[in-house]
Image (cartoon, rainbow, N blue to C red):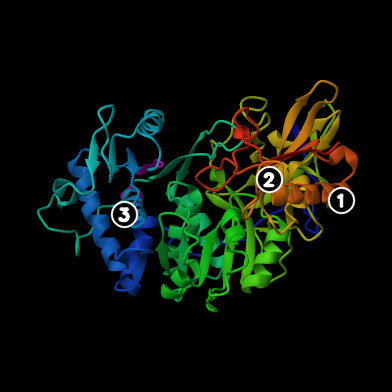
């Protein structure tokens, strides 16, 4: 496949390139140098804190841990370049071990600590670490050496000191992280990100969000995922800021917790923002919170507007993926924010291309024209994707140096990116393409609706038809009656007023809940199976 690229467009359409950030930065030598610089400039300042415990780590403490873990890895035969598994539930412990592994030139292999033992061992079998550091037992089927954090032998400094304070770790030889994609629409794949790619994005996040030493972030997202690692931990480290880590999102007492820790910004996903909309009568939203960042999944415009109106906190909708070390685009903090858009490219090149016929030629999309979203830049995994036409997503892969993300979207005349959905999610209804997000956004305009997802169902006449599933807040009554039925009828009427018949779902299902991944995305491939419980089902045809 060849690509016809039209040159730079003064209006920002077609393709958007990042600004030049080639100035010398003394922290550009890698994670070890960054940690050393933080220790030298603000060693006693608190870096990481536990949201609900007493665990805390200063920049001095982190430097000491880097030295101790470096000697520990050497002592156990894990040389620079080796893979080290991390199966740790405590967020501060996880972040500390993760940083120490990468700073010492090894490759961190994070695994979901809440997963069943069989799933953990399957992940380790795929990634092949030389050893595992964990706060849980490895089980009899563990195929690699398993070291418990609470084992005195693990905690001891091999050099004979009780800790590594005041010692100097050796130089790293690369290192980074080996991650699995979320697999919300298909099978996950492995992504390899060098520490310089991680730091490139961390620097971009810190600069774009204007993070500084006076900031304290809050991260309830899972740390085995790239977002929390880069946007939460590494961006805060780059900015010399503090970060409060929680094991997961807890709605009860949330705003009180933000006030107690003096949080200034929140790293979140749409599901969290939806739950925080409309604080209770006894809740007080702290005034020092500058913004809440939304990532991982599309944020409905109605949810964004309700949250901002009820809390007074700015929402920054963003877009990222594992293959690009997280952030790709983000709405500006002080500039124009466009509801429904995931914002402007941040230190990465983004373009939208349109396929034309069977000749294999692509052209850059015009402003507002829908096509395939592609990215290129120093943060992008050079081995990301699969060969053209193979594997989940079909055309995911690199084309002339560009990575086709698998997302469908458009750039407007100002260079803001709008996403319609994943290529795999598009429903072909008798030759007409139906984008699930268009239907989902209409359903979510009802303030009683918490979440919605539209999937394709097989149809003998049309090939595929859209079917909608949604959840609501509060009691719904007995199946097929009461409040739940009333909401479903209202949603059906809204769909009829808003969308043409060809783009409406053929059926509407009110369900108790939707299957989600650990990062808050609805797992579309698990929606609509035979075991799905329904409270109300309405025919929309």
Q: Residue at x 41, y 59 (%)?
A: 246
Q: Is 251 drawn above or below residue 158 in the view shown? A: below
Q: Quadrant of the N terminus?
A: top right
Relative horizontal placement of residue 419, taking residue 103 as reference (left or right): right
Mark 2 → mark 1, Cα distance in angstroms: 17 Å
Q: Is 374 drawn above or below residue 208 in the view shown? A: above
Q: Pick whichever of labels 3 and 2 is earlier in the sequence.
A: 3
Query: Which range is magenta?
Result: 102-112
Relative horizontal placement of residue 29, taking residue 345 as reference (left or right): left
Q: Pick whichever of labels 3 and 1 is earlier in the sequence.
A: 3
Q: Nearer the viewer, mark 3 or mark 2?
A: 2
Label 1 packing within 10 angstroms: few (<14), some (14-19), many (20+): few
Q: Pick whichever of labels 2 and 1 is earlier in the sequence.
A: 2
Quarter of the image where one finds residue 168? bottom left
Say which residue label 2 marks.
470
Visible residue check, residue 195: yes
Which numbered disc covers residue 93?
3
Circle 3/circle 1 CB separation < 8 Å: no
Circle 2/circle 1 CB separation < 8 Å: no
Q: Judging from the image, what secondary structure is the residue with disc 2 in?
A: strand
Residue 275 place in picture, x, y as percent:
58, 59
Residue 381 place in picture, x, y as percent:
53, 42
Say which residue label 1 marks.
498
Residue 145 place in picture, x, y as percent:
24, 34
Q: Residue at x 19, y 59 (%)?
A: 164
Magenta highlight on residue 52:
no
């Amino acid at each position: 496949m060849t690509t016809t690229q039209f040159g730079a467009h003064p209006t920002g359409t077609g393709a958007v390139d990042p600004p030049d950030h080639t100035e010398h930065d003394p922290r550009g030598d890698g994670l070890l140098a960054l940690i050393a610089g933080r220790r030298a400039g603000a060693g006693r300042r608190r870096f990481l804190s536990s949201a609900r415990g007493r665990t805390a780590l200063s920049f001095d403490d982190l430097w000491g841990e880097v030295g101790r873990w470096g000697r520990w890895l050497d002592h156990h035969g894990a040389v620079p370049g080796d893979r080290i598994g991390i199966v740790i539930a405590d967020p501060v412990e996880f972040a500390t071990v993760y940083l120490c592994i990468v700073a010492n030139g090894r490759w961190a292999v994070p695994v979901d600590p809440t997963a069943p033992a069989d799933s953990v061992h399957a992940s380790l079998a795929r990634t092949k670490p030389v050893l595992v550091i964990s706060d849980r037992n490895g089980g009899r089927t563990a195929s690699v050496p398993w070291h418990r954090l609470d084992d005195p032998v693990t905690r001891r400094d091999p050099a004979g000191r009780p800790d590594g304070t005041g010692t100097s770790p050796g130089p790293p030889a690369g290192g980074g992280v080996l991650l699995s994609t979320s697999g919300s629409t298909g099978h996950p794949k492995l992504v390899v990100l060098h520490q310089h790619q991680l730091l490139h994005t961390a620097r971009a996040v810190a600069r774009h969000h204007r993070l500084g030493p006076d900031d304290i972030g809050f991260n309830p997202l899972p740390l085995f995922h790239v977002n929390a690692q880069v946007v939460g931990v590494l961006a805060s480290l780059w900015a010399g800021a503090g970060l409060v880590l929680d094991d997961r999102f807890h709605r009860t007492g949330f705003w009180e917790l933000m006030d107690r820790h003096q949080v200034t910004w929140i790293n979140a996903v749409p599901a969290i923002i939806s739950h925080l909309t409309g604080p209770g009568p006894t809740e007080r939203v702290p005034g020092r919170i500058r913004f809440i960042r939304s990532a991982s999944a599309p944020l409905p415009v109605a949810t964004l507007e309700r949250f901002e109106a009820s809390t007074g906190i700015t929402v920054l909708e963003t877009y990222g993926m594992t293959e690009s070390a997280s952030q790709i685009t983000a709405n500006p903090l002080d500039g124009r924010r466009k509801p429904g858009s995931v914002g402007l490219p941040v230190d990465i090149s983004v373009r939208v291309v349109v396929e034309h016929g069977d000749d294999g030629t692509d052209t850059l999309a015009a402003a507002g024209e829908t096509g395939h979203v592609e990215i290129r830049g120093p943060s992008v995994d050079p081995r990301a994707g699969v060969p053209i036409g193979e594997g989940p997503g079909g055309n995911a892969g690199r084309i002339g140096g560009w990575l086709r993300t698998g997302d469908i979207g458009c750039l407007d005349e100002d260079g803001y990116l709008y996403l319609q959905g994943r290529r795999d999610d598009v429903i072909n209804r008798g030759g007409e393409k139906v984008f699930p997000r268009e239907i989902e956004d209409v359903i979510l305009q009802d303030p009683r609706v918490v979440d919605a997802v539209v999937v394709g169902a097989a149809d003998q006449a049309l090939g595929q038809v859209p079917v909608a599933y949604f959840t609501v807040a509060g009691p719904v009554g007995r199946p097929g009656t009461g409040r739940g039925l009333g909401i479903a009828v209202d949603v059906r009427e809204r769909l009829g007023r808003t969308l043409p018949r060809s783009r409406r779902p053929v059926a509407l299902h009110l369900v108790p809940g939707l299957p989600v991944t650990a990062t808050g995305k609805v797992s579309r491939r698990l929606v609509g199976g035979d075991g799905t419980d329904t409270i109300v089902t309405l025919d929309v045809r």
